[in-house]
Amino acid sequence: MKKTTLGFKKLKQQNERCVMVTAYDAPGARAAEAAGVDLILVGDSLGMTVLGYDTTTHVTTSDMIHHTRAVKRGAGNTFIVTDMPFLTAQGSDDRTLDAALRLMQEGGADAVKIEGAGTVFSKIRMLTEGGIPVCAHLGLTPQTVGVDGGYRVRGRTQAEKDKLMKEALEAEQAGAFMLVLECVTEKTAEEAARQLDIPVIGIGAGRCTDGQVLVYHDIIGQFNGKQAKFVKQYADAGQMIETALCSYAKEVRSGAFPETSHTFEPMENPESLYGGSK
Ligand code: KIV
């Protein structure tokens, strides 16, 4: 059964870990739902994993809607969180409202995720009060790496830890139902999970959070870029796919494919298209 925001809080209260994974299309979403994950994130990592960009900044609201709809078709019984893309949670409230509304109404998202702190908290409050569940995202926030220190671990000094804790509490007070903490020291993330009532989901945030999120393509081994230390790869789908395609190309060129079993005869039962009896 599809979980609710209350259900995620209950998991935390019962000391049960929450499983989140990204997905960007129907087959990935179907696999995630079949695996029984608690929720799916249509992350703007879409930009790198699927669309071929080198950062998330090129991803648009229309891209997120398109892919959220596909995920929804693949996993109709799983709670879906969709990322608010670059700059849609900054600037005017109208811009934020419009993007969030489209992700919910056109995309079918159950909630949105917003990266960052500061002025972002008022956006979290506005959306939550309007009825849109919001997942906050602190620590390393890929949308702003250009201005806040690049891809590095956060919460290492006492000052950084204090700042992060303050922001985490502010996100909760603003109404966030969940917090993603990315690339944060284990101790800082542990403290956040202890102090907050909402579930704290870690990615590169150690072992003591209320749950984990990983990028689908990192899990299955189908990502081209450098692999971060916090990733655990559970399969080598990239290699498997390449091997399969090489075999296909070789067999087409040699004439080994198609074989007799792949061909149709004039007297054959037309129903045999999908492998029925001849
Ligand atoms: O876009 C994304 O995939 C994310 C996760 C890394 C948390 O934000």
Image (cartoon, rainbow, N blue to C red):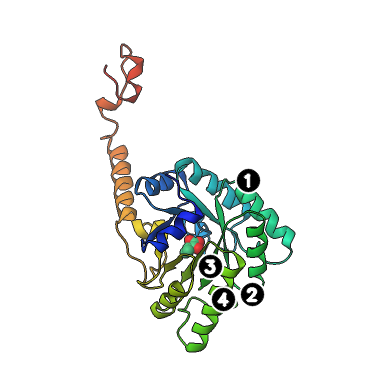
Image disc number at residue 118: 2
Q: Give the residue drawn at x 68%, y 59%.
A: 96
* Residue 219, image quadrant: bottom left
Instruction: State yes or no: discs 2 and 1 in contact (Cβ < 8 Å).
Output: no
Q: What amino acid is at disc 2?
A: Gly
Q: Give the residue drawn at x 55%, y 65%.
A: 136
Q: Give the residue drawn at x 71%, y 59%.
A: 95
**Comes first in the chain, label 4 or label 2:** 2
Q: Residues within 10 Å of mark 1 (few under 14, many from 20)?
A: few
The quarter of the picture where the N terminus appears is: top left
Give the Cα distance between marks 2 and 1. 27 Å
* Residue 272, image quadrant: top left
Q: Which residue is mark 3?
A: 137
Q: How many marks?
A: 4
Q: Give the residue drawn at x 59%, y 49%.
A: 65
Q: Which residue is mark 1?
A: 105
**Comes first in the chain, label 3 or label 1:** 1
Q: Determine whether the beta carbon of the residue marked 4 sits less than 8 angstroms from the nearest atom of ligand 1.
A: no
Mark in the foreground, 3 or 4: 4
